[in-house]
Amino acid sequence: MNIVQIKNGRKITLREPVENDAKEIIEFYNIVGGETKFLSFGEGEYKVSEDEQKNTIKSINESNNNTMVLATYDSKIIAIGTISSNQKKKGKHVGILGIVIKEEFCNFGLGRIMMEYLIDWCKDNNITKKISLSVSEDNPRARALYEKCGFEIEGILKNETYIDGEFFNIVTMGLIL
Ligand SMILES: CC(C)(COP(=O)(O)OP(=O)(O)OC[C@H]1O[C@@H](n2cnc3c(N)ncnc32)[C@H](O)[C@@H]1OP(=O)(O)O)[C@@H](O)C(=O)NCCC(=O)NCCS
């Protein structure tokens, strides 16, 4: 467990999830899905049962190349970061990074802190050699953060998402460790 202070003075706790967090994690994703258009799912579209989420937490906590970090304020989840990897010999060295912060807590440096936490976790696990992520081309805040953390653009997926009648490109980025 880590306690960090962000630029608005609030103290945020970073910790790994326990199975009892399942319900709140589902609620969190379903709320933030509606706050931002930059996630792969919208409001109420994170359709996972509490038991499924509990199993996911259990398998993440047992895995050496998957992790989840919860950021909490006042004991409530305000951000989640993940590294997801497969177990196959050819690909287990690649960790796919995901991050989402509740809008009220954005722009205060928490993204940078969580990115550094996840990158350090990957460097220390002795398996991950590359971190990959996907970001909407029109998400300058996230793209700026990833570039500041050393990620490089690897490709553009054209018309990959469809939002309110408009197609958007996805940028794939990578960081070799
Ligand atoms: C993207 C996200 C994780 C970034 O985290 P954050 O805490 O808001 O970002 P930080 O405050 O740590 O850093 C953002 C950096 O980008 C800069 N930035 C912000 N908006 C910017 C913009 N429009 N153009 C360029 N740079 C920008 C900031 O100045 C800051 O740089 P600095 O550390 O040198 O001051 C967070 O905003 C978020 O979860 N947003 C909603 C969901 C989302 O977009 N997730 C990513 C999906 S790929």
Image: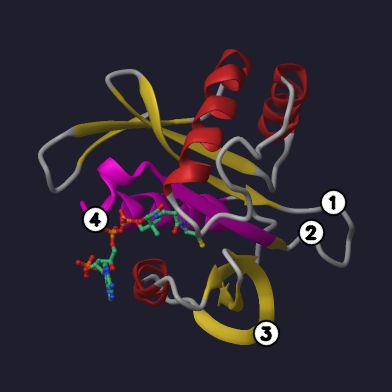
Q: What is the spatial separation of the Cα atoms under label 4 and label 2, in whole angstroms? A: 32 Å
Residue drawn at (70%, 42%) of the image: 64
Of circles 3 and 4, the one toward us is 3
According to the picture, the residue beneath numbered tag 2 turns out to be: 92
User: Is residue 78 at all visible to an observer of this figure?
Assistant: yes
Colour pattern of the rendering: secondary structure
Q: Which stretch appears magenta?
A: 95-124
Circle 3 residues within 10 Å: few <14, some 14–19, many ≥20? few
On whether ligand 1 comes within 8 Å of the CB at mark 3, the answer is no
Of circles 4 and 2, the one toward us is 4
According to the picture, the residue beneath numbered tag 3 turns out to be: 158
Amino acid at dot 4: Asn
Q: Is residue 142 left or right of residue 125?
A: left
Amino acid at dot 1: Gln
Residue drawn at (84%, 51%) of the image: 87
Question: Residue 144, image x and y in percent?
Answer: 35, 74
Q: Are marks 4 and 1 in contact (CB under 8 Å)?
A: no
What secondary structure is marked by label 4? loop
Question: Is 165 situated above or below 56?
Answer: below
Q: Quadrant of residue 56?
A: top right
| Closer-to-camera residue (128/72) | 72
According to the picture, the residue beneath numbered tag 1 turns out to be: 87
Q: Quadrant of ligand 1?
A: bottom left
User: Is residue 132 at all visible to an observer of this figure?
Assistant: no
Residue 103 belongs to magenta span: yes
Question: Is 52 situated above or below 170?
Answer: above
Amino acid at dot 3: Lys
Q: What is the spatial separation of the Cα atoms under label 4 and label 1, in whole angstroms? A: 35 Å
